Image (cartoon, helix red, strand yellow):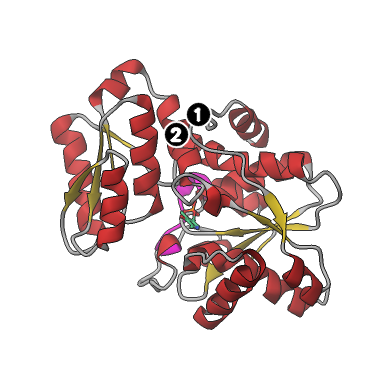
Amino acid sequence: MLEQYVKKILTSRVYDVAVETPLQPARQLSERLGNQILLKREDLQPVFSFKIRGAYNKLAQLTTEELARGVVTASAGNHAQGLALAARELGIKATIVMPRTTPELKVQGVRARGGKVVLHGDAFPDALAHSLKLVEEKGFVYIHPYDDPDVIAGQGTVAMEILSQHQGPLDAIFVPVGGGGLIAGVAAYIKYLRPETRVIGVEPDDSNCLQQAMAAGERVVLPQVGLFADGVAVAQIGAHCFDICKHYVDEVITVSTDELCAAIKDIYDDTRSITEPAGALAVAGIKKYVERDGV
Ligand SMILES: *Cc1c(COP(=O)(O)O)cnc(C)c1O
């Protein structure tokens, strides 16, 4: 399985729209924690997150006939913007169903990238149901935000860049987890090439679907999820994602909302950038890990 994913990652098409982001030393944090800490600056992508990698790679693998039908997804977040930009780049139609409660900023983010926004329902499940109805009625192709091998492979290009940008020893890579597309791609690539490097997932303690699935040995559905880190508020880990994670993720750490807020400030101190809460998960996880294990 790993070899197949590594082949998919190496042949992924992402750089028509994504950029190779810097792997940047976090000087103050490194000093404070007594470890060399590097930040992979995916906030510098054109849609401010890595989602453009998976979305574009998925579209690039579709047939001409599928592309002509147009694509659809349900998302209130970064996947929506990634898909809209990817579709515009390929000159195809993208319809994004968003719950009516979606902040105007995110609706505009999709429209500004040429996506057609359909506001439907009060919560994500309503939007999802409507997007699947559009698949039936209009023949659109549904593009999943994480549970798809081509999306996972696109996200895995993050790990490919990390290994080429940092050639010395690497103790561990901390990866934020929502539905598990990013960590699945990273784990597949890293465990094939550098199995000694630990791959550690980080989740909010009130939205820990991967940690609970790993403990149960199967995918569980969380009865409710915390919304502070809205980018990772997912109730069930993806099936393709879990197939990889259950074998290749070394452990999952959870952090509190307070720890996330502190990590947002740590990142600001080192970079002068303000991340969304999900974007600070990995730093919150690293701090906890260093403190716990005294590395
Ligand atoms: C989507 C997203 C995640 C989680 O990615 P998954 O592939 O769903 O696990 C983490 N952080 C940000 C900023 C995201 O947009």
139, above or below 190, in the image: above
Answer whether residue 239 is magenta in the image. Answer: yes
Residue drawn at 31 percent across, 23 percent down: 67
Residue drawn at 40 percent across, 74 percent down: 226
Q: Nearer the viewer, residue 289 or 272?
A: 272
Q: Nearer the viewer, residue 290 or 30?
A: 30
Q: Nearer the viewer, residue 162 or 24?
A: 24
Q: CA distance from mark 1 to mark 2?
A: 8 Å
The picture places residue 225, in percent across and down from the top left corner, at 39, 71
Q: Residue 273 is drawn in which quadrant? A: bottom right
View extreme (left): residue: 137
At label 1, which amino acid type do we have? Asp
33, above or below 138, in the image: below
Q: Residues within 10 Å of mark 2 (few under 14, many from 20)?
A: many
Residue drawn at 26 percent across, 29 percent down: 70
Where does the C terminus fall, quadrant-wise?
bottom right
Residue drawn at 22 percent across, 65 percent down: 101
Q: Which residue is mark 1?
A: 16
Residues shaded magenta: 232-241
Q: Which residue is mark 2?
A: 56
Answer whether residue 281 is magenta in the image. Answer: no
Q: Residue 251 is drawn in which quadrant? A: bottom right
View extreme (right): residue: 168
At label 2, which amino acid type do we have? Tyr
Cβ of disc 2 within 8 Å of ligand 1? Answer: no
